[in-house]
Amino acid sequence: MTDYKDLSKIDTTVAQHRKATDAGIRPVYGLDTETYQGDIFLIADSDGRYLDKDVSADTVLDFLFHKKYQNAVNVFYNLKFDAIVILKLLGKELERYLHTRELAFQHGDFRIKYIPKKCLTITKGHKSVSFYDIAQFFKTSLQQAYERNIGPMPEHFKGLKSARGEFSARFRRRHIRLLREYCINDCIMTKALGEKWLELYYQAAGFYPKRLLSSAYLASRAMIFRGIAFPRFAEVPLHTQVLAYRAFVGGRFEQTKRGVIGEARNYDINSAYPDKIAKLHDLTDGQWMQGNAIESGATMGFFKVVANVPDWKYLGPFPFKANANLVYPTGKFVTYVSIEELKACERKEWYEILDSWQFVPNDPNYHPYDEFVREYYAKKTELKERNDPLHIPFKEMLNSIYGKTAETMQLEKKRVMGTFFNPVIASHITGSTRAQIYRYIRNNGIEKDVAFIATDGISVTRDLGKGSKALGKFALKDYAQDVFCIQNGINRWNGNWKERGIGSEKGKTLDNYDIYQSGEGVYMKLKVERVTNLRSAIRQGKIAQIGVFKEEIRKVDFDGDRKRFWLGKINSLNEDQFNESSPLSLSVFTREQI
């Protein structure tokens, strides 16, 4: 029996409030901190205000509660770091989290609340100020984001930029004026990017948002502003939501070959998740039907099945999760799947349906989100081809809509659903994408030519042409004559090491990393937080280590993949070694061994 997500652990009784307010044009302020070993020694804003003496919780909170910030858009570049070093100043007050399980604190007359990576809010009386992260919309360093979207960065600051984090106490004393200028310049660049983003969003959505919480938040508000929105959680029968959540396992990440691959091509689905949203029907206009067979006319469905996949299969059709490891095995097992995964499976005798809930729409030709998605996709494609930065908000909003349908959050001591949380939609999107990948491989007869699968794309050793630019179609994204695969996400293409899907490791955020080869080994140079996050620091009593980074160099394990059974090992990069694999067979392995 597969492991699955348990909906009963989430409070789904909270209201899903949905409102899109045009906040109009407001002033934008950029802010930044400078730290040494995790402690703030300077905070500044884009108007040239700064604090670099007597830095404490009192002085920093007073600085941040300035009247001008109270009706403005205030942005940091990488709020995740700035917020935790600001909160670090609260000292033992952070231990309040141990009792409330909420990142909400009190310091004198100030109330401080932090939504990780999204928003830091400071309240005093009936007034409040909020600070957001503009970096999340540009997906690169401050310098690169500025130079790509605004203009060149002043040359005399570039050397300091590369040395940031290494300012000793002696250097700070001797060059405090220079550091102020440097910090204020970062604030000015941050402000410019904030203004740029707001203008781009306005052109894309037609209004100015009140908050800049995330791309997903802004996408959902754009939909609401247009008068379209996903059904609320309660508008779908609870038993269907329970089954859908059990079938929700995310994207398929699977490597099938390693070592010397030779010539290979990457094919991705164009905007895979937005395409699935465009094809959704009106879930409030139709019937949910229970049964042990696929219903005629059903366009969405979730199933509990007994799978019995033969061991000769190279790629398994159905997911199975055990011990936090998601695999696609052969053999006999019980799992949960979407309707599209059953339809993509080549033989009906490979599964038996135990239970299901399926949706049959009253109007199979009506797709309420199709126009919105296609309009944004067409604009994004056109603007990107012209190298116009306006494509950024279209891309970010399209790609992030899905995330809102799976969003939950911690509220005090319980997990609650987000405003767009709806398991039937989240599970259908991911399940349909997995099915599309599997069907594409089958239809092209390339099952044993696949080197790896990565959510919405595949790497293959066959030439399948250039594909299509159309929404939801496969297109050629990359090609190399010399490919060497180690793990799914770490591969060498024509001599250059590339990664895909790396962003965290064992709960630790990898903010900066580099992959390089030395001798016969491949290494990752990581900049890793000493503690996993703010909550962990508080729980472990390591508040003093908040904001402290260390550099680690780790050798990549050539044989680190545990999702398949490997027929050999890779011992060297300098030899023509190649390993094939087969799915883990549940006729041979137990779930405890996965």
Image (spheres, grey):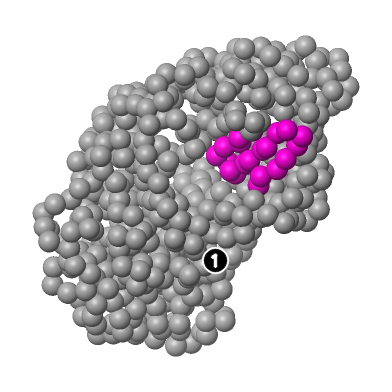
Identify the residue under disc 1.
561
Depth order, front residue of 58/172:
58
Residue at the image point whose x is 50% and y is 51% from the top: 501
Residue at the image point whose x is 48% and y is 33% from the top: 212
Q: Give x and y (percent) for residue 460.
A: 35, 57
Q: Is residue 66 visible?
A: yes
Residue at the image point whose x is 73% and y is 33% from the top: 109
Q: Quadrant of the C terminus?
A: bottom right
Left or right, 178 with respect to 591, comes to: right
Depth order, front residue of 522/369:
369
Residue found at the far right of this picture: 170
Q: Give x and y (percent) for residue 241.
A: 36, 67
Crowdedness near tag 1: few (<14), some (14–19) or many (≥20) residues, C-alpha within 10 Å: some
Q: Give x and y (percent) for residue 131.
A: 58, 30
Task: Tell me which amino acid carries mark 1.
Answer: Asp
Q: Give x and y (percent) for residue 45.
A: 64, 18
Question: What range is drawn magenta here?
Answer: 103-122
Magenta stretch: dominant secondary structure: strand
Residue at the image point whose x is 28% and y is 77% from the top: 356
Left or right, 403 with respect to 188, comes to: left
Q: Relative to residue 265, is residue 357 depicted above or below?
A: below
Depth order, front residue of 256/435:
435
Q: Relative to residue 257, is residue 346 depicted above or below?
A: below
Q: Is residue 434 visible?
A: no
SS assignment at label 1: loop
Left or right, 368 with respect to 550, comes to: left
Residue 497 belongs to the span the image colors magenta: no
Depth order, front residue of 80/590:
80
Q: Relative to residue 71, is residue 462 depicted above or below?
A: below
Task: Please give the count of numbered marks on the rendered protein.
Answer: 1
Q: Quadrant of the N terminus?
A: bottom left
Residue found at the far front of this picture: 125
